[in-house]
Amino acid sequence: MTSVLVMQLAGPLQSWGASSRFARRTTEDAPTKSAMIGLVAAALGRPRTHTPDDLAALRFGVRIDQPGTPLRDFHTAHRFTTGEAMPVSERYYLADAVFVAALEGDRDLIERLHQAIREPVFLPYLGRRSCPPARPLELGVHHERSLDDVLKYEPWQAARWYRRRQRPQTLEILVEATAVDGPVETVRDQPLSFDPLHRRYALRRVLRSRIPPPPEPADGPTTVPDHDPTSLLGEPSCT
């Protein structure tokens, strides 16, 4: 039996690289599968050397609820060991973007991932460590609906100001294509290894489509778990 884990990805900045090279680090227009598998693996507390095979087998899809604004930043860094300056790089981000992402697979695994993103071992981030989420990630688990139906009917998570001022006619959905799907594009974001010494990614087939915006979420209090992964950072100091 399969289930679907639904997450919202919202923050001041996000960056979802799939083909970055050398000093130019670009971002895709939507979260990549490799980034989302890395996020839930970190929430489980897995080291980078752990094989991602079970998580990579999950079917992935994402809906662009608020596309955000592209942003370019000039980035400087120094080597930790020697202090030597590294080349100036260009890093690209999406500002004020909101996505609904979903993972579909074995019910027991999905339930474990749901608990993990509510109480993560390692802090989640939106593509890069400098991009923390601005909202709780979890939107729930569906046991009766498919991934495609969840992305079609999940309430629209765009910011209230965006829903009022922009209100596009359609939202774009990107789902992992099956053998019976129509024309697709390929992206190299199927994770094979996150090992820093030997990262590897395979090609994955993606199908794009568009749907009318679903209903807006009902206003109400959000339940937040008692667990606070930032507590390990200690109390802020004031001077």
Image (cartoon, helix red, strand yellow):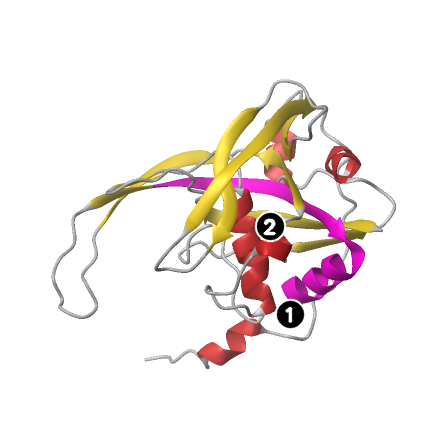
Q: Amino acid at mark 2?
A: Ala
Vertical relation: 92 (above or below) 112? above
Task: Write down the residue under mark 2.
Answer: 56
| Residue 167 visible, this orientation | no
Query: What range is drawn magenta here?
Result: 92-118
What residue appears at the point 57 percent right and 41 percent down from the top-left corner?
98
Secondary structure found at label 1: loop
Where residue 173 sits: x, y (%)? Answer: 64, 30
Task: Write down the residue under mark 1.
Answer: 119
Where residue 25 sits: x, y (%)? Answer: 32, 41
Quadrant of residue 214 within the rendered picture: top right
Quadrant of residue 168 within the rendered picture: top right
Where residue 46 sits: x, y (%)? Answer: 54, 68
Secondary structure found at label 2: helix
Q: Is residue 78 left or right of residue 58?
A: left
What residue appears at the point 55 percent right and 44 percent down from the top-left corner?
33
